[in-house]
Amino acid sequence: MAIYEYRCEEHGSFEVSRPLGTAPESVACEACGSGARRVFSAPAIRSGSRTSLYAAIDHAEKSRYEPDVVSSVPSAGAPGRPRVVPLTPKLAGLPRP
């Protein structure tokens, strides 16, 4: 289920839960019954734990005033690019980036 946001001119925003991809362009307002148009808002996507998010925010804030001091160039990482096996033989002929 997805949460869709609608806005009534008189009563403001409200949310409607519907199956993904089935939201109409307008629905009846929950308070007055008049047509409310769908508005698009930023999705609530979160990956990882809150502690890692807070740690990243704290590190970014600290680096504003106390930047990390490095003494050498970072390593280049693993040599070469790992070979990716295509899922189907038809994909093997596609150009690679």
Image (tube, rainbow, N blue to C red):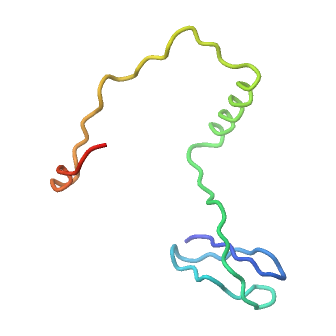
Of residue 20 and residue 96, the one placed in the foreground of this image is: 96
- Where is residue 18 shown, x and y percent of the image? 58, 77
User: Which part of the image, by quadrant, shows the C terminus?
Assistant: top left
* Number of marks drawn: 0
Q: Quadrant of residue 75?
A: top left
- Where is residue 49 shown, x and y percent of the image? 60, 43
- Residue extending farthest to the top is 71
The vertical placement of 18 against 75, above or below, is below
> Residue placed at 62% from the left, 75% from the top?
17
Of residue 73 and residue 59, the one placed in the foreground of this image is: 73
> Residue placed at 62% from the left, 37% from the top?
52
> Residue placed at 80% from the left, 86% from the top?
31
User: Which part of the image, by quadrant, shows the N terminus?
Assistant: bottom right
**40 relative position to 96: left or right:** right
The vertical placement of 48 against 87, above or below, is above
- Residue extending farthest to the left is 89
> Residue placed at 67% from the left, 72% from the top?
39
- Where is residue 60 shown, x and y percent of the image? 69, 31
- Residue extending farthest to the right is 10
**31 relative position to 80: left or right:** right
Q: In which quarter of the image is residue 12?
A: bottom right
**12 relative position to 38: left or right:** right
- Where is residue 80 shown, x and y percent of the image? 29, 26
